[in-house]
Amino acid sequence: MERDQNQLIATLNERLTTLEATYLASQERLEREILRVQLLQGMDSKRLSENEVLYFYDSYKKSNGNSFIDKKVEDYLQGLKRQREEVDE
């Protein structure tokens, strides 16, 4: 009986470990998606400053974000630079 209980405890431990790993992976993906959406929506509405874009972009890249955002961020930052140059003229 004790052996059965130990086996049951070991099985439950394995399941909890697997569940925790799954939860953490899901949490990481969710955080990355939230960053991606914040970044894309902020750039689309043109309400993010250069520093804000770089902050969100750095956070996104640290969370293993994909390269789809790279081009969007680059284009947005170039657009901000052009706007500053036009104002300076």
Image (spheres, rainbow, N blue to C red):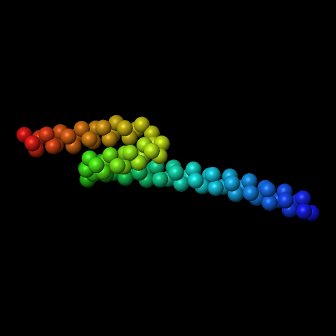
Q: Residue furthest left?
A: 89
Task: Give the residue drawn at x 21%, y 43%.
Answer: 80
Reply above or below: 77 against 38: above
Q: Nearer the viewer, residue 71 or 14?
A: 14
How far from the left and from the top, in percent, is residue 8?
82, 59
The residue under the point 51% across, 49% down is: 29
Identified at 37% across, 52% down, the residue is 38
Q: Is residue 54 above or below residue 12?
A: above
11 is higher (above) or lower (below) than 61: below
Q: Tell me the residue at 90%/59% (across/down).
A: 3
Q: Is residue 41 visible?
A: yes
Q: Position of residue 4 (x, y in %)?
A: 88, 59
Residue lying at the far right in this picture: please name it: 1
For the N terminus, the quadrant is: bottom right
Picture mark count: 0
Q: Does residue 44 appear anywhere in the picture?
A: no
